[in-house]
Structures are given as C-alpha cells and as structure tokens.
Amino acid sequence: MAQVIFRGVRKSFGNAPVIHGFDMDVRDGEFVVIVGPSGCGKSTLLRMVAGLEAISDGEIAIGERVVNRLEPKDRDIAMVFQNYALYPHMNVEGNMAYGLKIRGLPQAEIDARVARAAQILELSPLLKRKPRELSGGQRQRVAMGRAIVRKPAVFLFDEPLSNLDAKLRVQMRAELQDLHRRLQTTSLYVTHDQVEAMTLAQRMVVMNGGRAEQIGAPLEVYKKPASTFVAGFIGSPPMNLIPAGKDGREVLLGVRPEHLQPCAEGEAKMTVNVDLVEPLGSDTLVYGHTGDNGDGARVAVRLHQSFAAQTGRLPVRFDPAHEHLFDKATGLRIED
Amino acid sequence: MEKRVVFRSAWLPYALLAPQIAVTLVFFFWPAGQAIWYSFQLQDAFGLKTQFVGLENFRALFNDPHYLASFRITALFSFLVAISGIAIALLLATMADRVIRGALAYRTLLIWPYAVAPAVAGVLWAFLFAPSIGIVTYVLKKNGVDWNWVLQGDQAMLLVVIASTWKQVSYNFLFFLAGLQSIPRSLIEAAAIDGAGPGRRFWTIVFPLLSPTTFFLLVVNIVYAFFDTFGVIDATTQGGPAGATQILVYKAYYDGVKAADLGGSSAQSAILMLIVIALTVVQFRFVERKVQY
Amino acid sequence: MIENRPWLTVFAHAVLILGIAVIAFPLWVTFVASTLTLDEIISVPMPLVPGSHLWENYAQALTSGTEAGAAAPVGRMMLNSLVMALAIATGKIAISIIASFAIVYFRFPLRNFFFWMIFITLMLPVEVRIIPTFKVVSDLGMIDSYVGLTLPLIASATATFLFRQFFLTVPDELAEAARIDGAGPLRFFWDVLLPLSKTSMAALFVIQFIYGWNQYLWPLLITTQENMYTAVIGIKRMITSGDALTEWNLVMATAMLAMLPPVAVVVLMQRWFVRGLVETEK
C-alpha cells in the first residue's frame, strides 16, 4: 500500500518532449484513471512509474521512496499489459508464479499465493493450461493474477481491456471494480475509453498533448470540464460548442446534448436544423446545425423520446445551470 | 525495426557477441584480408621470395585467355543451371499446387535431393553417364549418340549442368510451392469468373505474382552455380576436358592448390569476392523492394 | 480447383510422377549397383533390378573400405561426418543465438559495427577465400582435427539473421513483463526466449546439419589422414581414374550410406526443414 507522487515529471524522446511537466499526488488505495487520445503521453507516464522508461526530469515517488533510479523489480509495482504479455510456453500457474520464483520465495508460499489468486479470479480449474488454450477474458484474468500474487504496493494497468470484445469489457470492468474494493491497492489505469474512465475512476486525469488538462473526480470533470478539449472528450456525443459573444469577448457556449430539451418555438434558445436522426431505442440522437445557411455550428441533441421526422427544425432550450463558457482563444473554462 | 525495451549492461552484450566475432575475425576477415594482400604479390616457384607487384596479377589474369574462357564458361554454366532448374521446378510446383490428393507425398519425394552433397550428386550422375559402363551411355550409344564426356567438352558441360540442376530443383520447387500457396484463392477465382482458363490464368495472374520469387531464385541459383557446385565439378570432370567445365571457383582452387600460384589464385579470389558482393547487393535491394509490396 | 476438368488433374499427376521418376532414377541405379558385384556392374548394360550382394557390399564398405582406392572403413568416415555435422549445426546455433540476443536486446557502442561485421560474412563463402583460410588453420595447427574441420565453418550470418528476425517478432511486453517480474537479461534469455525459439532452432538445425554433412572442399583440404576423412570425401577418394578399376559396387554402397543421414533428416523433419529453408532466405 502506498501513495504515488509525481513532481514536475517530464519526458522527451531525443529532442521531442512528450510529457511537459506532470504533478499529482495519488493517495494510498486510490484508483486513478489516466485517459486521453492516443499519443497524449498517458502510456509513457505509466511506463515511467513502472521503470520501463527513464524519467527525463522531475521525480516519481512510490510510498516514501523516490524511484527514479530503481529497476522495475525493486519498485514494488505490478503491471497488466494490453496484450497481457503472458509467457506462451508456461502454463497459468507458471505464469503467475514466475516473478515469485525469481524473488526466491519458498515454494509453499508461492503455491498458497497462486491458489489464492486463482480462487479470487476463478482460474483454479485452468491452472495447468497454456495461454493459447484460454479465451481472451481468461488470459486477461491470468494477467491480473500475475499482478495480484506479487502483493505490490501499486497496480499499473495499460489499457487492459482494449483487446476484449464489447460485452466482455463491460463484465471485466465490473470485476476490476470488485477486485479493487477487496484489495484496496493503489491503482493507476491507462485507457483511451472515456466510459472506462468514468466508471472505474475515483479520480481521473484527462491528458492531451503531454499535459494534464484536468484532474478530478469523474462527475466533477463531467460537470465542470476545465477546457474545450475535456468537454469534447468526456461525454458522448461530445458537448456542443457554439460560438457566441459575451461582454464583448469571443466565447464558446457549451451545452451537452443531453441537456437540450425540445420546446415551443417561442421559448427556444436556439433552433436546430436537423440533418440526421439516430434512434437508439432508449433515446434518440438528433444531429443538425444552427443557422439557416448551413454555416452554423454543428449541434447534437439527445432526446428521451422518439423523434419521427428525418429533417425539419427542432427548437430547443436548456437550463442555464447547464451552460458552460470557454474562452475561444485559449479553450479554457471561464469560471462564473 | 528496433526493440522498445532493452536491457542494460556494460559488458554482457560484448561477452555474448565475442564467440561469433572471434570466429569471424580469425576465419573470415583475416583470410579475406590476406587474399587481397596476396593478390598484389608475386611469389617465386619455391615460395621463398615474395614481391609486391601491384595490379600485375590482375593484369595477367585479364590477358590470360584461359581465365577469360573460364569467365565465359561460368556464365554459360550458371545460366543453364539457373534457367533449367527454375523452369523444371516451376512446372512441378504448379502441378503440385493443383493436386490435392497426395500433395505431401509428392513434396516428400521431390525435396530429398536437396540433402544430397554436390560431390555425391556428381558421382551419381557421372556413374550413369560413365563412358564405358554407364547405363545412360549405353542407351545413348544404342541410339547412335557418340557419348564420351571425358573427351568431349560439350558433353562434359551437359553432365555438370544436369547434376547441378538435379540437386537444385528441390530447393526451387519448395520456394515456388510456397509462393503459389500464398497467392490468394479469391484472385484466381476472380480471374476464372472473368473467363480466363487455367493456362491463361497462369501466364496473366500466377506467373506475374510469382515474379518476386522467380527473381529471388534467379539470384540464389546463380550464386549456387558460382560457388556450391565446386563439389559437382571436382567429383566429375575436374574442370576438363581441356578446361571446358573449369568454372571460376574451380580455377581459383586449381591455380592455388594444384598449381601453387598464390598471387594469381588470390587475385581470382578477390575478383570472386567482388562478384559475390555485387550479387548480394542485388539480392538485398530486391529484398528491400519486396518489403514495400 | 476451379473448373472440374479431370484430365487436367490427371495431367498434373502424370507430370509429377514423371518428374519424381526422373529425379529418383540416379538413386535407384545407385541402389541397384550397391547390391551387385563389380563384374555385374561392368558388364554393359548393368541390370536394373537389385542383386544379392547387398549385405556383403555394405559390410565391406563400412568395415574395411575399398582395396584399390582409399582403404579407410566408411564406418569411421560416417562418424567423422556425424561429428562434423553435429558440431557445425549446434555450434552455429549456439553462437548465433547469443549474438542475436545481444544485438536485438541491448544498446551499446559499436552495435551496428558488429552487426555489419557479421552481415558481411554472407559475402565471403569458403570457396572464395579458401587458400588463406587454409593457411590460417594450418598455422593454428588444426589440420586433421575436428576443431579444424568445424570451427572455421561455425560463424554464420544466416543463423544470426534468422534469430534476429525471430526475436524482433517476440512482443516487447514479454521482456517488460519479465523485467517487472525481476528477471535479468540472462534469466529472460534462458527462461523465456530460449523456450520460444525451439522451432527456429529445430529448423536451423536441419539446414545446418545438411550443410555440415555435405561439406566437400573444406574437408578435402583440411584432412590428410584417412581416419579423418568424411563420408563425402571418402567416395571421391575411392574413385580411381578409369571406370573399370574403380570398385563401383563399394563406391555406390558408400554413396548410399553417405546420403542416408541427411536425406533421413530432411524427410523426417520435413516440417522444420521447409520452414527453416523459407525463413532463412527472407
């Protein structure tokens, strides 16, 4: 059990900077999800914690120790990889026990830990199987088991669910949450999937271009996105951003599709010229644009009832409490 | 292509490379350097005195009609071995790709000559074609062919070409078969739907798609004919009669070992090295191009 | 096939069978000759059905050799060939796999230099540098020794490339997982990389065993004593000039014996052989 502290962490490959200074205190037992588009530096950040990438500047501490110069094996961490990285020639038991064997743990202790992890992850009947004889979900669990048996201070997850199909991903997400509730181990979890981030995180870090755009609890990030990037990245479809002017300043007015409500023409705050309607069953997505010449902003509306027409005009209103304002030039949130 | 992860150690990589580098230095670079050095030297008949003569050995070589003849012979020999080996292998591979039943058995029965040593291949064919007792000679003579490769240069050439080709067909066959099997089935089916019959499909679809393999095999077969056929020649004609089958490698060996002409032989080695380097570069550029496919 | 044209399939089978017959004909004649007496062979035309002297010929060849040509027993030669083929195959695999490991999994000064140094040996077949190499080996006192027969042929750019190629396909995450598990480079090599390389090693073994067994020019130069001859050299030495003086029945029995091990390796390990062949040339 440990906290993870980042102090001015930077990384560059050659002359190309990929992380521009990252600061954060991850509390003991906390589940932190780092989310962002590909190439934003989230995996690099995780790999620096693991010791797989050197830290160019700043420092990372796990527990009380600065780990910058420590080998991965000495950092008291365990990592789950996107492609699982199971040793193909070893069986499930061998995969989980390998790290313990290298550390020279007594065989009885190894057996006990592997059996315990197998039980938690429901792998007990599969211990003698080779990775190629397992399904994707089972392999994922073995990778998790390999991390658990080490009893590390910190779990590192590098897009662990990306190779699974959609249904299995939902199931594994729930299992991960359950596992964290039981073990209470500090976890850093990297993903590009905002749904995973929203559901798993106690706190999330939204990264873009090597910077943390926002760090906060999922709902806080959803309710008060710190920039247009975060507003666009978290939530689906992304927040509508409509150019407007306020106090003589160019701003972007943000409203989430789910906060727009159809209304009578008279009380409408704006009118959407509908281009496309996607009925999803539970609700309906309407895409369109403002203005009449086709040069207005694109707008999406999530309706909780069906919408019969395929084209036409949809007057909408929204509660001012759901209105976000961003500076057009910097993209940063304008606090009210 | 590079690994993202690497281990760190100041000494371990050198220790791991040491055996290979040591063997390479002692048995490749040192002798190759010496070959080049000797090629600029002239040694007297008793090997007592050596003298630096610059390019004299090379000049002598290119003024030597025997050496120039050896060049022509090597070119003819490589051409014949490569072309016949590739043609026969392509025919057999196309047929083997067609049949479904017994495909593995056919492959097994066709690939074993690869395992036969060139020298042994030479002995086998020399025995079949032996001027007095050979079984094929007997048939040829019955049909009015005056067969004696010990005396007739053309026939000696034919013999070494047959023996060399025989050994190489299995290699070419395997590559063609692999090439044929990698052609997407849908492509052939599309051509069939477009109305192309089997023959037309072969020449317009299959053969063009095999051209990288064919080109690759052409280079490999030329290298094979240049160097690996030494055993075939030495076990059959020994370059004879009257130098009719004396390919470059054999001449370099003969001049160096039998005739003890160190400078001349080394100059020939140096020229051969240049040829190998040229062939390797051609092959390498081709491999690069193949990657872009 | 796409069209149902039975005659085309029949034609394909016919071509294949004809091809196999032509290719196998020398082998058949060799086998028949190895079962005849010398008199039967030199009475033109020799018979094309096996005779009754199979055991005699093979027994004589194996234990005492020919009378006119080389008098060494072929049994001894086969042993020499076996030692040579095994030493070359295992030696090449061993030194190449560790060299590739160093080149792929480490970054160090002169790495590219060493890589090119190994690569360039591709361009220098034994045949090209035969006399200076012979001089080096004789200066080192390795004439007529197993070390002299095998060591100079052990460096192999081909094998190094094959392993390099294979290592590059091993996922990076495997090495990372091993590092996190606490495995150092040698431990990773031994516990993970080596078991994964089994198929590549088997494929290379087949190719290099044949290469070693079939060596001709090198042993021809390096062996002067009959007890160091390899089987391939032995056959050549048994053939005296003039068809009639040669004991063809014994030569042919020896040829059969010399072909047997490499052909058996190719046929029995066909799967690895085909893989090895196609992959080493990539």
Image (spheres, coloured by chain):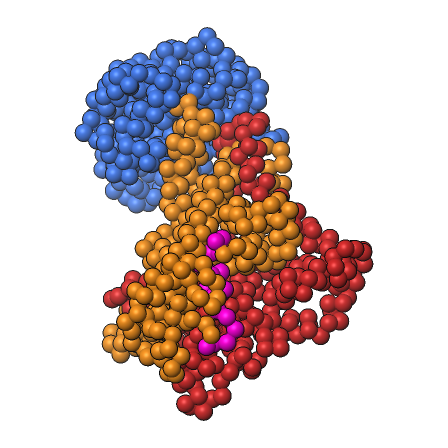
Chain colours: A blue, B red, C orange
Q: Is residue A336 above or below residue C233?
A: above
Q: Is residue A62 above or below residue B117?
A: above
Residue most extreme to the front: C67
Could you say where residue C130 lies in the image, as x and y percent from the top left?
61, 56
Residue found at x 43% / y 20%: A73
Q: Is residue A155 magenta?
A: no
Could you say where residue C106 lies in the image, as x and y percent from the top left?
53, 33
Residue found at x 31% / y 42%: A277
Q: Is residue C229 magenta?
A: yes
Answer whether residue A14 is visible to the viewer in this image.
Answer: yes
Answer whether residue B186 is visible to the viewer in this image.
Answer: no
Q: Is residue A124 left or right of residue C56?
A: left
Figure disc tally: 0
Q: Quadrant of residue B263?
A: bottom right
Quarter of the picture containing the N terminus of chain A is top left
Q: Is residue B255 above or below residue C48?
A: above
Residue found at x 34% / y 25%: A98
Residue most extreme to the bottom: B144
Could you say where residue C56 lies in the image, as x and y percent from the top left?
32, 66
Region in magenta: C227-244
Residue most extreme to the top: A64
Which of the two residues, B165 or C51, is positioned nearer the viewer here?
C51
Residue found at x 62% / y 33%: C109
Which of the two residues, B83 or B45, is positioned nearer the viewer here?
B45
Which of the two residues, C159 or A216, is positioned nearer the viewer here?
C159
Q: Is residue C181 left or right of residue A51?
A: left
Q: Quadrant of residue B195?
A: bottom left
Could you say where residue B202 lies in the image, as x and y percent from the top left?
39, 72
